[in-house]
Image (cartoon, helix red, strand yellow):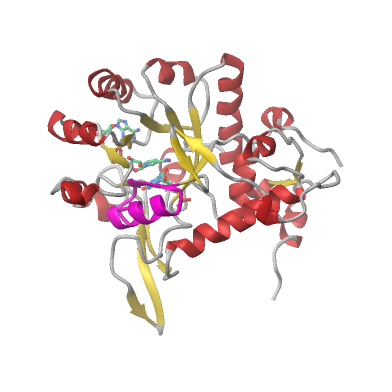
Amino acid sequence: MKIYTKKDLNEYSLSLTYDDISLVPKEISQVKSRTEVNIKSKFLGIDLSVPVLASPMDTVCGIEMARELNSLGCIGIVNRFDSSLEELFKDEKSSEGVQAVSIGLNAEDELLEKIAEKNFLVCIDTANANNAHVLKKCEEVKKKYNLKVIIGNVAHGETLTRLVDAGADAVRIGIGGGSMCTTSIQTGIGIGQVSSLLDVYFHREELKLNIALIADGGIKSPGDVAKALAAGADIVMLGRMLAGTKETPGEVIKYNDQLWKKYRGSASFGVKMKGEFIEGEETMVPYKGPVQNVINSISDGLKSSMSYLNCNSLDELKHKDCFAILSTSSYIERLPKK
Ligand SMILES: NC(=O)C1=CN([C@@H]2O[C@H](COP(=O)(O)OP(=O)(O)OC[C@H]3O[C@@H](n4cnc5c(N)ncnc54)[C@H](OP(=O)(O)O)[C@@H]3O)[C@@H](O)[C@H]2O)C=CC1
Ligand SMILES: Nc1nc2c(ncn2[C@@H]2O[C@H](COP(=O)(O)O)[C@@H](O)[C@H]2O)c(=O)[nH]1
């Protein structure tokens, strides 16, 4: 069987996603215990214990989630759709423990000044970073307020230099791959998440650009987190994996003797409240309890993956370069059976 490097995968004829690839352990690991594996990193100057960002969706990240993730050594980006941003600036105490917020293209100076006072990380939350108006907003936020800026999304690395020139510090990679996403069905846009990530990764490396890469959408398990980081992401952005946890905004609902919480796309009817350009769905997900359980499971899975691959740091994982492409049967074989 061929062992693929990132470059091989990037040149593969078909677009690939997480379920198409696997990591291959092929050397003697020197790791004595998974507890010793170091998964610490820095993202735009912030120290992380686990390289996870919560997506700025209204059923994923409000103030409570952002605070809890901060205390767990991750980052939660407060969403722009509900009343969270208003609450955040109510008084001095309300923004304690929060590090990042999202804004739309129409964000005004009044809001940006408050954000700048707190020196928050700003995510310009749009579907398409390859848009002149998004780049203009990015330039404005950088020039006027000199904040760290995340923009997105992109599916390909072709325009990466333009994003960097506009001042972007990080980019969300992935169009059409989110679990609530109907963009591909509605528009025919988007490729597999792994191929998107690799393409942007190689553009960054070849052009020696200084921009952090966020693998955003389609990550379903700690194993997918490991694959995304091995494929070149600096951090992963999660929606579905964090949805349903105690700290997400929204009520816990009892139905058929089971507990549920709502999860919906930012371009769903429920968020937009008008029937134009709907590119997202809405669902109920089982209640999962504290988000700490999810983060612990990601931390364990990632450390274990790195131990198999003889990696002691995330930087080593990024340079491991040992992937397989899975046949459909070998993908199915790897799933637990009843
Ligand atoms: N990762 C992904 O694949 C996607 C993610 N999303 C998420 O949903 C959120 C809400 O999306 P949505 O309200 O549709 O749009 P955005 O919030 O991204 O809209 C940003 C602005 O861009 C304009 N625009 C022009 N062309 C497009 C386009 N092709 N897609 C989207 N906007 C466009 C919009 O105006 P007008 O509406 O008048 O055109 C709007 O003024 C996004 O912020 C993003 O987080 C949405 C779609 C895809
Ligand atoms: N096309 C759409 N994409 C959306 C929408 N809302 C969010 N998103 C994207 O999905 C990820 C989360 O993905 P998941 O697989 O972890 O659930 C999020 O960060 C956005 O990039 C939407 O309505 N339409």
Residue 221 is at least partly visible in this image: no
Task: Compare residues 332 and 302 and report the one nearer the observer.
Answer: 302
Whole-percent x, y for residue 30 in the image: 81, 47
- Write the start and end of the magenta stretch as one range: 53-77
Whole-percent x, y for residue 294 in the image: 50, 61
Whole-percent x, y for residue 193 in the image: 56, 40
Task: Compare residues 311 and 232 and report the one nearer the observer.
Answer: 311
Task: Compare residues 217 and 230 and report the one nearer the observer.
Answer: 230
Q: Residue at x 30, y 57 (%)?
A: 64
Q: Residue at x 51, y 57 (%)?
A: 295
Q: Quadrant of residue 26?
A: top right
Is residue 317 one of those drawn in magenta?
no
Q: How many numbered marks are there?
A: 0
Quadrant where the N terminus sits is top right
In the picture, measured across the screen, residue 216 lies left or right of residue 325, that is: left
Quadrant where the C terminus sits is bottom right
Whole-percent x, y for residue 293 in the image: 50, 64
Instruction: Classify 250 as above or below 268.
Output: below
Q: Quadrant of residue 331?
A: bottom right
Residue 258 is at least partly visible in this image: yes
Is residue 75 one of those drawn in magenta?
yes
In the picture, measured across the screen, residue 281 lies left or right of residue 145, that is: right
Q: Residue at x 37, y 50 (%)?
A: 280
Q: Residue at x 52, y 44 (%)?
A: 51
